[in-house]
Image (spheres, helix red, strand yellow):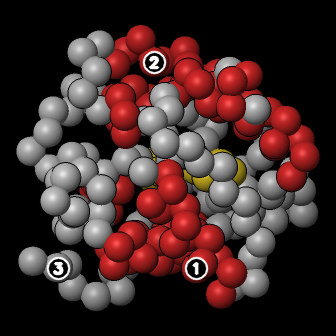
Amino acid sequence: MADALGQKLRLELKKHAIKSVLLAKEATYIPQWAGPMMGLEAQLAWHNPGLVIIQVGGNEMAMPNPSIRKEAVQSLVKVVGDRPCIWIATPKWEGGPHTGILDVIRDNCSPCRFVDTNILISDLKRLEDRVHPTIPERTRWARFMIRWLEHNLQPTAKHPWALRERTSAPPPASPPRR
């Protein structure tokens, strides 16, 4: 799902003359990104991003005991360090099981900001798999995240991508789709 959003988000950021780097790999899990397997720590050191956007956890949506991911979520956030960071929630699967991984992420991803896609864009149209957003909806999701960032940025001398203390959703660009 990170690639579904990431490719479109990269295009939207480019329109604003913002360079981005996308690290995505299919069928991965939070502990893989929190540990050395994915090389995230080295990538962060190499690219030194001003903002880190995390979008992982979709493959854990149906796991029987998502609370076992608490430490992995906390470890992943530690890898990010003191960089401004947002963790974008995976859209819940249509009709699929939701055993609580998004709650575990929300409750343990601080100081990253948790952005709940499911509340902010509750009507994403899906592919036939009922999991992944359609291509046009991925663009809509990316554009919404650009608006969210514009609405919630509060740059400081130390961090040009610092976020306001309290984040909120920007007003919708158009009425929700039915």
Residue that mark 3 sits on = 177
Q: Is residue 160 above or below residue 35?
A: below
Spatial CA distance of label 2 from label 1 is: 31 Å
Q: Which mark is residue 69?
A: 2
Of labels 1 and 3, the one closer to you? 1
Q: Residue at x 31, y 51 (%)?
A: 91
Q: Residue 139 appears at what percent x and percent y?
A: 42, 76
96 vs 105, left or right, is left
Instruction: Identify the mark nearer the N-term, 2 or 1.
Output: 1
Mark 1: give few (<14), some (14-19) or many (20+) Cα within 10 Å. some
Q: Amino acid at mark 1?
A: Glu
Q: Amino acid at mark 3?
A: Arg
Instruction: Identify the mark nearer the N-term, 1 or 3.
Output: 1
48 vs 136, left or right, is right
Q: Is residue 155 visible?
A: no
Contact between labelled residues 3 and 2, with CB atoms less than 8 Å apart: no
Q: Is residue 11 above or below residue 108?
A: below
Instruction: Identify the mark nearer the N-term, 2 or 3.
Output: 2
Q: Residue 133 appears at what percent x and percent y?
A: 30, 63
